[in-house]
Amino acid sequence: MLKSICKTILHRWLGWRVEVTEQTPNKCIICVAPHTSNWDFIIGELYYTSIGLTSNFLMKKEWFFWPFGRLLKRIGGIPVERSKHTSMTDQLAQKAKESSHFSLAITPEGTRSLAKQWKRGFYFIALKAQLPILLYAIDYPNKRIVCTKTLNPSGNVDADMRIIMEYYRQFEGKHPEKFAVEEIAQ
């Protein structure tokens, strides 16, 4: 029933289309960009619930206040304390290795503000756990949720990040002035 409600809200009420050609494996990292608005989270949750899947996601710990924090944890939220430098990538990679199902959605920009350099944690979790990275875009002007590319990390971070940046260059967030892809030297 929840699946049907989310599908109705996303497609009929809000008018979003889905252009997804990639299969979602039992274990993966879901890279989501552009991330320029809190609406990205809502659109993403509506979409993923509408297809009957669940995913964990990282979110700054400040959002996990009562009673909202309980709901966020229940739907897969993992609080992140950004001021502390912990081995979160190692912990998440280990959890992925030990699990039969593991799906983690990450916005590599790490903020809704303009980020000229993306965080690489999603890449290193995938590399350490040998997981594919599904490249999802929330394309606001065209009201599309797009995933037409999966990247298997090679270990050559710069080369793989160039592929990722090139993929996301074609999309636009809700606030285009807050989205930038990196120019990574050859």
Image (cartoon, helix red, strand yellow):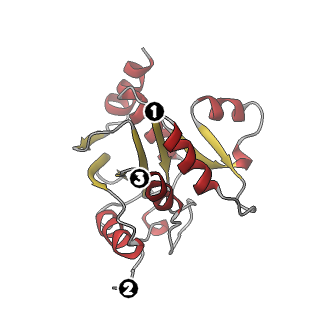
Comes first in the chain, label 1 or label 2:
1
Q: Residues within 10 Å of mark 3 (few under 14, many from 20)?
A: some
Q: Is disc 3 placed on a helix, strand or loop? A: loop
Give the residue type that dot 2 points to. Answer: Ala
* Real-space CA distance between mark 3 and mark 1, rounded to the nearest whole angstrom: 13 Å
Q: Is residue 166 above or below residue 95?
A: below
Comes first in the chain, label 3 or label 1:
1
Residue 100's disc is 1
Residue identified by numbered label 3: 130
Q: Quadrant of the N terminus?
A: top left
Residue located 29% across and 48% down the image: 146
* Real-space CA distance between mark 1 and mark 2, rounded to the nearest whole angstrom: 37 Å
Give the residue type that dot 3 points to. Answer: Gln
Residue identified by numbered label 2: 185
Q: Quadrant of the C terminus?
A: bottom left
Residue 28: x percent and y percent?
A: 41, 45
